[in-house]
Amino acid sequence: MSTTLMISDLVNESLDGNSCSQIIRLENIFKVYGTGETEVRALNNINLVINQGEYCAIMGPSGSGKSTAMNIIGCLDRPSGGNYYLDNVNVADMNDQQLAQIRNLKLGFVFQQFHLLTQLTALENVMLPMVYAGVKPAERKDRAVEALIRVGLEKRLHNKPNQLSGGQQQRVAIARAIVNAPVVLLADEPTGALDSRTTQEVLDIFSELNSTGITVIMVTHETEVASQTKRIVWFRDGEVVHSHLTPQELHHLVSS
Ligand code: ADP
Ligand code: MG
């Protein structure tokens, strides 16, 4: 049986599970970097459940394990121990090829530094994930245009990244992240390189996407950004120390 078949079988199987609403379930997740004297325990027994349709901010001091957790949730890295169920499929033991396929099928990514390909236009950047997903060429352009309309960039289809503002580049990156209709959108400091006006534009797009059912998980260090989500998770020293902070509790935590 090919890997493709195996993954789609697993995906279909997951639809029959009785805990369908749990899109992300981390169970006793450890992550250790290095060995011996240079060993760093980046995640120390993380347990976290995120349900389908949530809009969640991950916060915590620098070095507390936020990016490490996002890389594991995003199937960009594997845990050293524990189980990770994505849409009820345990992905902790999958090989690189299987992880790449799961990423392409289920996840969209937005990063602080946009990570657009500079020699390609906005349209071409957004079409790229569909090449890997095996979408028919005739369909790619239509879907890319649709995604770019969704982020308000219909007039910028043929601009290259250096002809776009930072906020516009991040909107292209969001269009690229949603073009394969992911179930989860993961964003690591997506507004970290933006001014307050364009930050708000990006947050408005995330809210709109979330209202259509996409689960959004965002790392941020800005309390005003986190306060616009529906749930705040707080990391410290590689552990989840608060899994549901209100904006008021957050305010209290960061000002104490
Ligand atoms: P955050 O995103 O909250 O700032 P990180 O997840 O980046 O934290 O890092 C958590 C801990 O793991 C830190 O002590 C960091 O130095 C360490 N770390 C992160 N990535 C690596 C790596 N590739 N190799 C070694 N140590 C790492
Ligand atoms: Mg980080």
Image (spheres, rainbow, N blue to C red):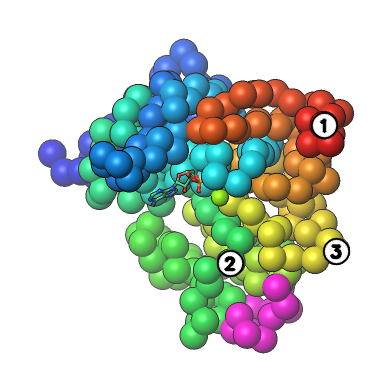
Identified at 30% across, 41% down, the residue is 37
Q: What separation in Å lies between label 3 and label 2 (alpha carbons)?
A: 17 Å
> Vertical placement of 73 versus 142: above or below?
above
* 240 vs 140, nearest the viewer: 240
Q: Which disc, if any, is residue 215? A: none
Q: What separation in Å lies between label 1 and label 3 (alpha carbons)?
A: 28 Å
Q: For numbered disc 3, what is the local secondary structure?
A: helix
Q: Amino acid at mark 1?
A: Ser
Q: Is mark 3 within 8 Å of ligand 2?
A: no
Q: Amino acid at mark 3?
A: Arg
Q: For numbered disc 1, what is the local secondary structure?
A: loop
> Vertical placement of 178 versus 102: above or below?
below
Residue 161 appearing in the image: yes
- Dividing the picture into quadrants, the one containing residue 82 is top left
Spot occupied by residue 203 in the image (x, y as percentages of width and height): 76, 52
Crowd class of label 2 (few under 14; some 14 to 19; many from 20; radius 10 Å): many
Identified at 26% across, 41% down, the residue is 35
Q: Which residue is mark 1?
A: 256
Spot occupied by residue 122 in the image (x, y as percentages of width and height): 59, 76
Q: Residue furthest top?
A: 18
Q: Which disc, if any, is residue 114? A: 2
- Dividing the picture into quadrants, the one containing residue 86 is top left
* 209 vs 95, nearest the viewer: 95
Q: Which disc, if any, is residue 197? A: 3
